[in-house]
Amino acid sequence: MTTSAPPEASSSTVCARLDQVSKLFGSFAALRQVSASLEPGRCYVLLGENGAGKSTLLRILAGLLRPSLGAVKVFGESDPHQARARIGYMSHAPMLYDELTAEENLRYFARLYPGRACPAPADVLRQVGLDPSLPRMVGQYSQGMRQRTSLARVLLPQPELLLLDEPFSNMDVESAGQMVELLAGFRRHNRTIVLTTHQRELAAPIADWVLRLRAGRVAEFAEGNPTL
Amino acid sequence: MMGGALWTHLAKELRIEWRSLDAIVSMLFFSGLVVVLFSIAFDPRGAFSQQIAGGVLCVATMFASVSALNQAWAREIRHQVLDAQRMAPSPGAELYLAKAIANFLFVSIVQVLLAPFFFVFYNLHIAGQAWLLAAVLPLGTWALVANGVFFAALSIRSRNRELLLSLILFPIFIPALLAMVQATTGILTGESEPTLWIKMLAGYDIIFTTASLLLFDVVFHAE
């Protein structure tokens, strides 16, 4: 993977703000009164056991879920969905069509962002270490290759806020290291990264802040290294 | 106002179907079976076949379409592609319309391929104005797919979505089915004037397509 030079993101003091956010699914509280401010150009690592609320928090920041209580502001919008063109969200699932090649998938998604200056899909695929001329459909890719293609899809519209749910899963150590290098390049260009992972040591080189969730509550929100 | 994303979605739908032929092949086999089974169940000779042919054609199209419409959003659900589409700033209505147009084309292809067999099996001779079939079949097909794609999207978060689609779609489709059958029978037999039924089909299409376009974003962005 090679680091690219995306345009500088707009600089403001707060990129996203969560104020006493709770999310209920029926009687189950996935998040309880979570408050946090995310600054531009920082990398936030979300830690926690399975079911702690990490993915729910990312989906709320992405505007895919609405909080049951509390308020969320992303890029000054009280509905994050209004700022969705500036947000890149990568989930556990690849969010790609199996029946298209990686380049076809990227070309399709690039056209859904008419206001954004998307780089050429082939260039983004090269950035994540994939060969754009590969004639195989995404359905025939290995898990690791799908993960890279998924990251390429997220990076395509040059988002200012990157929300990555388990980006290193199914990746070998070398590929994960290359992904970290790529993300570090994005962070240097004033872009904010929020990622969840169970592989703390992989996120350590880029982590600025650690937000630890336990049973939907913030157990720790501290500056520093997630391996500590 | 529809923008360029409509053509992007449509090109993607057609490309995927061209590679897999999933919808067209399953619909062709299903509707072919219905036509053959009805021709065995009823004596397909004489005036009686003219009377029932319109109904058989519509029912065959309807059941075959539902098998494809049930899968209309399957690819979007499989790997959460729908979330990626929801994150994009292009309007959801364009995705809906592209899916409806794509399914309309798939069903129309099946109807064209099925037509010769239909005329042979039912020994049909068109007594009315045959060219009116070129209005009735597309209007009836659009009524089915426009509603089908919308209600398939509505039911994607349900565990029993395949059953749910049939339960919602069939009652709502009844006025269009009635108009389609009456118009087709009128054209085949030449005994009644189909114009009123065709107008009713056109009105139905306008109302339900407009409502679906207006409401689709709510369904699309529902949690």
Image (cartoon, rainbow, N blue to C red):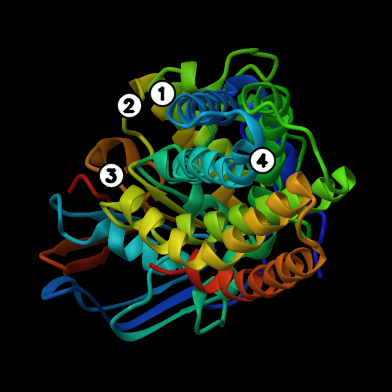
Spatial CA distance of label 1 from label 4 is 59 Å
Query: Please, which chain is the residue tagged with disc 4 on?
Result: B
Mark 2 vs mark 4: in front:
4
Q: Mark 1 — residue? A: A144
State left or right for residue B102 relative to residue B67.
right
Q: Residues within 10 Å of mark 1 (few under 14, many from 20)?
A: some
Labels 4 and 3 share a subunit: no
State left or right for residue A121 relative to residue A163.
right
Q: Amino acid at mark 3?
A: Thr
Earlier residue among tags 2 and 3: 2
**Residue B48, horizontal then vertical, whole percent:** 59, 40
The part of the image, by quadrant, that contains residue A36 is bottom left
The part of the image, by quadrant, that contains residue A119 is top right
Query: Please, which chain is the residue tagged with disc 2 on?
Result: A
**Residue B37, horizontal then vertical, whole percent:** 45, 26
Spatial CA distance of label 4 from label 3 is 67 Å
Spatial CA distance of label 2 from label 3 is 12 Å
Marking on residue A170: 2
Mark 1 vs mark 3: in front:
1
Q: Mark 3 — residue? A: A197
Specify the quadrant that holds the N terminus of chain A: top right
Marking on residue B50: 4
Q: Amino acid at mark 2?
A: Asn
**Residue A77, horizontal then vertical, whole percent:** 55, 82
SS category of the residue bearing label 4: helix
Q: Amino acid at mark 4?
A: Gln
SS category of the residue bearing label 2: loop
